[in-house]
């Protein structure tokens, strides 16, 4: 007797995974078993880390570790509830005051991640009668925030102010509120938004602006306040960011006017209906902010490393998308070739993964630099790139 294969409602998973493999889009995790730093043990092997967002090396800094331990000793491991119920600690208030000071804003609100900060803020600020104009290369959470809000979301071409202006002209009058959204430092390209010009357009067309400083905070500005601070932008705007990159902890934030923050406390679902940030993450983030505000030398060292790498790559005739930030993306041709390059680097003890569609439109090797990289480590990386 022939037995019919039993089908289940989950069979589509095999087919989907199959298509992901066929398109070379399949991704998997690599296990790290060492402390954050320039040398990491990945899948049991020591490698040079050129992929971390730990730009200032703070994720492994003793002062952050001690602050996390002290916060845990004082408050315990969890914050036990949502912020409006039992999860609002004095430590959260301290962190929010520190962020507002770092960003030079009236107030700030801490979320469980940068992703949730963007989702919550965008979905609260605009709705079905509104328009979002966003850079096409904005991070996933800005785009998903737009979807969640129900607003009409239109992308403008990457960094293209002419396109943004044309889209404002064609659409602005049809909507109640308009929000322009942009990353300050584009996470997969490493180039920078022209924030002053965007602010001018926003004034002209009566728009709000939301800037995601995930990769700018700690890295730009005299006190590490981000690209907004480095450019001296004073106007009212909505600054979002993460505590998980240069600040070496976990969590996200929105910084802005007291009114905006008050409104978000009442309307941002990803803040209201979730547990407050853990004491350890909160304590570490406070320590990180104190360091980035006072230790400009960390940033100076980072920029020195960026310049050294830029000069080296240029002398080898290797092009990168930009050298404006510690994120250096090198386009390699097709997906298969980019994956081969990542494998080759890996065989040589360098961890710098291939980033490919659908995350980005063109495949590339994304390298990130850290304050703690040595010239020898950078030279070794260049040697491997050159050999390839
Ligand atoms: C531009 C940008 N925004 C937001 C996020 C999300 O931040 P988090 O990791 O804190 O969720 C990231 C993280 O990769 C990012 O690159």
Image: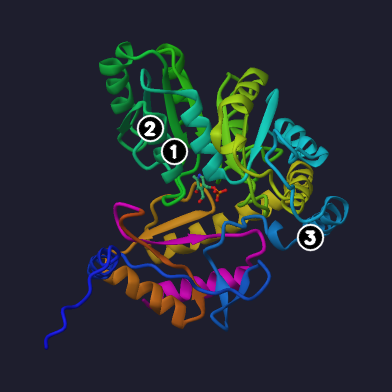
Residue at which label 2 appears: 134
Quadrant into which the C terminus falls: bottom left
Which of disc 3 and disc 1 is earlier in sequence? 3
Residue at which label 3 appears: 65
How many C-alpha atoms fall within 10 Å of the one at disc 1: few (<14), some, or many (≥20)?
Answer: many
Q: Is mark 1 within 8 Å of ligand 1?
A: yes
How many C-alpha atoms fall within 10 Å of the one at disc 2: few (<14), some, or many (≥20)?
Answer: many
Q: Is mark 3 within 8 Å of ligand 1?
A: no
- Is there a contact, CB below 8 Å, between mark 2 and mark 1? yes
Q: Nearer the viewer, mark 2 or mark 1?
A: 1
**In the foreground, 270 or 342:** 270
Which of disc 2 and disc 3 is earlier in sequence? 3
What SS does tag 1 mark? helix
Task: Name the residue at 49% across, 43% down.
Answer: 185
Indicate whether 27 appears above or below 44.
above
Which of disc 1 and disc 2 is earlier in sequence? 2
Q: Position of residue 10 (x, y in %)?
A: 30, 65
Quarter of the image for residue 164 reads top left
In the image, residue 363 lies in the stretch drawn in magenta: yes
Residue at which label 1 appears: 142
The structure's colour scheme is: rainbow
Q: Position of residue 236 (x, y in %)?
A: 58, 19
Q: Which residues are magenta?
A: 360-388
Task: Name the residue at 39% across, 79% down.
Answer: 344
User: Horizontal placement of 223 versus 309: left or right?
Assistant: right
CA separation, marks 1 and 3? 31 Å
Q: Position of residue 151 (x, y in %)?
A: 36, 26
Indicate whether 252 appears above or below 316.
above
User: Horizontal placement of 11 versus 280: left or right?
Assistant: left
């Amino acid at each position: 007797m022939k037995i019919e294969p039993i089908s289940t409602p989950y069979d589509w998973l095999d087919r989907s995974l199959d298509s992901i493999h066929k398109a070379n889009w399949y991704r998997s995790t690599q296990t790290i078993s060492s402390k954050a730093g320039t040398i990491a043990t990945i899948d049991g092997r020591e490698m040079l880390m050129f992929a971390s967002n730990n730009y200032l090396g703070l994720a492994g800094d003793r002062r952050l570790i001690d602050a996390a331990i002290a916060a845990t000793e004082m408050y315990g491991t969890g914050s036990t509830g949502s912020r409006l119920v039992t999860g609002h600690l004095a430590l959260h208030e301290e962190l929010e005051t520190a962020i507002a000071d770092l960003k030079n804003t009236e107030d700030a609100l801490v979320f469980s991640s940068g992703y949730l900060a963007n989702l919550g803020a965008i979905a609260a600020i605009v709705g079905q009668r509104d328009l979002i104009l966003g850079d096409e290369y904005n991070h996933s959470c800005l785009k998903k925030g737009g979807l969640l809000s129900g607003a009409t979301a239109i992308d403008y071409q990457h960094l293209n102010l002419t396109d943004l202006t044309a889209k404002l002209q064609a659409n602005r009058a049809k909507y109640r509120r308009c929000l322009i959204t942009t990353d300050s430092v584009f996470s997969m390209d490493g180039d920078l938004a022209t924030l002053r010009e965007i602010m001018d357009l926003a004034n002209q067309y009566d728009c709000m602006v939301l800037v995601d400083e995930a990769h700018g905070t700690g890295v730009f500005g005299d006190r590490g306040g981000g690209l907004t601070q480095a450019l001296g932008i004073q106007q009212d705007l909505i600054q979002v960011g993460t505590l998980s990159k240069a600040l070496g902890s976990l969590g996200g934030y929105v910084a802005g006017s007291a009114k905006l923050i008050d409104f978000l406390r009442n309307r941002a679902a990803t803040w209201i209906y979730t547990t407050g940030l853990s004491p350890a993450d909160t304590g570490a983030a406070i320590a990180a902010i104190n360091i980035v505000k006072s230790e400009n030398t960390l940033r100076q060292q980072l920029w020195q490393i960026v310049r050294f790498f830029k000069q080296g790559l240029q002398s080898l005739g290797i092009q990168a998308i930009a050298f404006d930030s510690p994120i250096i993306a090198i386009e390699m041709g097709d997906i298969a070739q980019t994956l081969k390059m990542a494998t080759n680097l890996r065989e040589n003890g360098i961890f710098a993964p291939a980033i490919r569609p659908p995350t980005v439109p063109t495949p590339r090797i994304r390298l990130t630099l850290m304050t703690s990289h040595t010239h020898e480590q950078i030279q070794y990386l260049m040697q491997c790139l050159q050999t390839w």
